[in-house]
Amino acid sequence: MKASLEHLGEPTGSSIQLKEVIQARFDAPYHFHPEFELTLIIAGTGKRFVGNQITDFGPGDLVLLGENVPHCWQNHRKDWLATEENPMAAQALVIHFRKEFLGNDFLSKPECAALRQLFDKARGGLSIQGPTQDRVARELMQLGDLAPFPRMLAFLNILHQLSQAGSDAQVIEVNDSSYALSAVDLARINRVYAYVIANYTQEVHLDEVAHLANMTETAFCRYFKKVTKKTFVEMVTEFRIKHACELLRSSQLSMAEICFESGFGNLSHFNKQFKHYMSETPLQYRKLVQEWQVG
């Protein structure tokens, strides 16, 4: 899986692009584009990747992404191994738009102050929750039935609601500094993330990753730490820990099985790293989750 700069093309007959996704599974590669993106998941479950953050997603997941924020939604790995596919198992409504979709001067108007703040917050992606998610999801589902001009007005109202979301709008990726890189550097670092997303449950080879970045291993390690503020090993470990958390929540696999399913080489190292990142052991985490589910 390669990260890529996605060229969405010019919208035809509209300032915004509205796309309905209906397929067996979400399989878009890890990618980025200069357009903003508002995505509502209608059906399907799996993992959402935004920057270097991994989150479980399900129906109702609503996310606003800023310019060039790398992302993808992928079904759980078990869905890829299903013997019979449901062609409608993965459904989403996706809107792409440019910040200046109503003209270069639109956002400079005093009435657009809240909208400017919304777009600024979306640099690291926003997860929309609570009552705002409910209202916006309902209105998004109606956009496809509207003529172009009423659709634009309805979309402006949606953006207004998002700008007033307050605590319902949670920043996904706090460290968004990498998205201010040049196009060349952004593409380079996202090739690395794409490789990790595809391989973090297996053995990850530093020489292969450095080759993707067109660097020596030493130069790549320095470069990655400078861009992401963490080491490459730390990033891979975080992906694996989050995968282990999902297995602890949703399966009855043993600790050893979860250890190896998440890409760790031995149980002792898994337990040590899990406690370092989660401040509790895997067994304690599973027990707390079970108590919360029962309660």
Image (cartoon, rainbow, N blue to C red):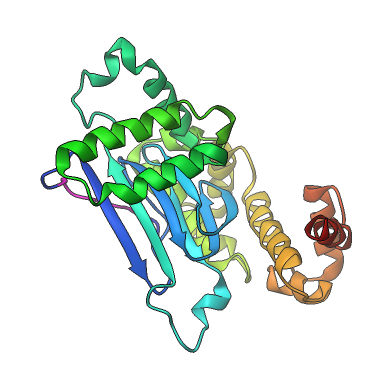
Give the answer, above or below, for where 77 lies relative to 276.
below
Start-end of magenta stretch? 5-11
User: Residue, x 64% and y 46% (percent of image)?
Assistant: 231
Left or right: where does residue 81 sit relative to residue 97? right
Residue 167 position by quadrant: top right
Residue 77 drawn at (x, y percent): 56, 73
Give the overall secondary structure of the magenta segment. loop
Left or right: where does residue 96 sit relative to residue 77? left
Q: Nearer the viewer, residue 189 or 47?
A: 47
The residue lying furthest to the left in this view is: 13
Quadrant of the frame with the C terminus: bottom right
Residue 287 position by quadrant: bottom right
Q: Nearer the viewer, residue 164 or 67?
A: 164
Residue 203 drawn at (x, y percent): 63, 70
Residue 93 position by quadrant: bottom left
Give the answer, above or below, for where 224 lies relative to 115.
below
